[in-house]
Amino acid sequence: MSATPGTQVPTIELNDGHAIPQLGFGVFQIPPDETEQAVLRAFETGYRHIDTAEMYGNERGVGAAIRAYGLDRGDVYVTSKLNNGFHEPDEARRAFEGTLDALGLDYVDLFLIHWPLPTLYGGDFVSTWQTLEEFKADGRARSIGVSNFQVPHLERLAAETETVPAVNQIELHPYFQNREVDAYGGEHGIATEAWAPLAEGRVVRDAALAELAGRYGKSAAQVVLRWHIERGRIVFPKSVTPERVRENFAVFDFELDPADLEMIDELDRGEPGRNGPNPDVFAYVPS
Ligand SMILES: NC(=O)c1ccc[n+]([C@@H]2O[C@H](COP(=O)([O-])OP(=O)(O)OC[C@H]3O[C@@H](n4cnc5c(N)ncnc54)[C@H](OP(=O)(O)O)[C@@H]3O)[C@@H](O)[C@H]2O)c1
């Protein structure tokens, strides 16, 4: 971990040598016509890493905010993800061009397969991954990775393709710590990005976390984000509430004691703690 110049946000070095800011801003469920303002608020706070996706429908707003704020391209880290409907290679190529067009950028920092969809496309996510390898080779994606991949999916990529994903973006929060997938990533140089890092806001209603947070003079959300960061994960909490956007960024002026990190580890409920879909069976394709 090293500090990003000009901000307090540490970076993590990915397996391809590129650095990613460990804290970013997620825009899932932010309506397209509100995204530019939300991302501008994030930039004003200091965030320089934005996580969007084709399926969020708001890449255009992200690009508009980058231009409106006047950021140099090298000063912002942008991730997007392939739409579930476009896994077939030619469709993926067209969709990726659409992403660059909507963002108004000539490259993204990171492009992901959003879901493995093992029950669709004849179970073939390998040719999709090989298509992302093309985007990396031609420089239009600085890094490529996956999202919601389970261990057998990662093992298959390792056996059948050349590139180890730089990241795996998975559901991970105190109640669902996704330990097997996270550990596989740790052993194979795949950085874990934790989606729904605040369990979609549920952590703020947790009495044990509230008690712990009180001892640090912090909020439960801040303590949970700090736990993710100290455990080496990448996070991008989403909020459309200005004070929460600032609160979620103010996590670099304290450290958790080892016993408190372990206390949060112990909140894991295993599979019953999962909130989102199970990637083994998830088969949603936008109409
Ligand atoms: N790869 C995938 O399949 C996948 C799936 C889901 C999410 N993601 C990514 O991960 C990002 C984050 O996940 P998420 O948006 O699902 O969940 P999250 O960040 O864990 O939680 C967001 C929710 O928590 C609330 N919240 C945020 N900060 C808070 C705070 N300090 N105190 C109290 N409540 C707070 C927000 O409310 P307000 O907005 O009303 O303030 C919102 O309802 C997404 O935006 C997206 O980029 C990826």
Image (spheres, rainbow, N blue to C red):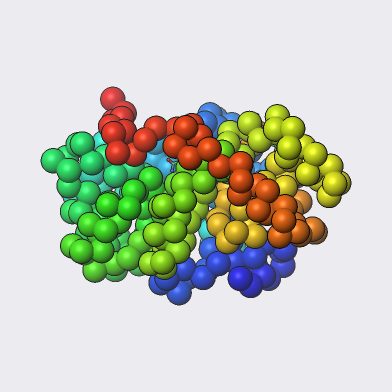
Quarter that holds the N terminus = bottom right
Question: x, y (%) of residue 242?
Answer: 73, 37
Residue 143 visible in the snapshot: no
Compared with 191, 195 (above or below) is: above
- For the point 29% across and 67% down, which residue is it? 163
88 displayed left or right of 27: left
Q: Residue at x 30, y 39 (%)?
A: 280
Q: Is residue 273 above or below residue 249?
A: above
Given residues 119 and 177, the one toward you in this image is 177
The quadrant the C terminus occupies is top left
Q: Which image quadrant is residue 111 in? A: bottom left
> In this orientation, which residue lies closer to the viewer: 242 or 119?
119
- Residue 8 point in image, percent of width and height: 72, 63
Task: Give me the residue at 80% from left, 39% from top.
Answer: 211
Can residue 200 be seen? yes
Quadrant of the image occupied by residue 27: top right
Near-viewer residue (235 or 6): 235
Q: Quadrant of ligand 1?
A: top right
From the viewer's perspective, tell me whether residue 16 is left or right of residue 285.
Answer: right
Total number of numbered labels? 0
Task: State which quadrant residue 137 falls in.
Answer: bottom left
Q: Position of residue 121 (x, y in %)?
A: 16, 40
x 43%, y 42%: residue:
53
**Which residue is farthest top?**
287
- Report x, y in % for residue 93: 24, 51
Left or right of residue 17: residue 259 = right
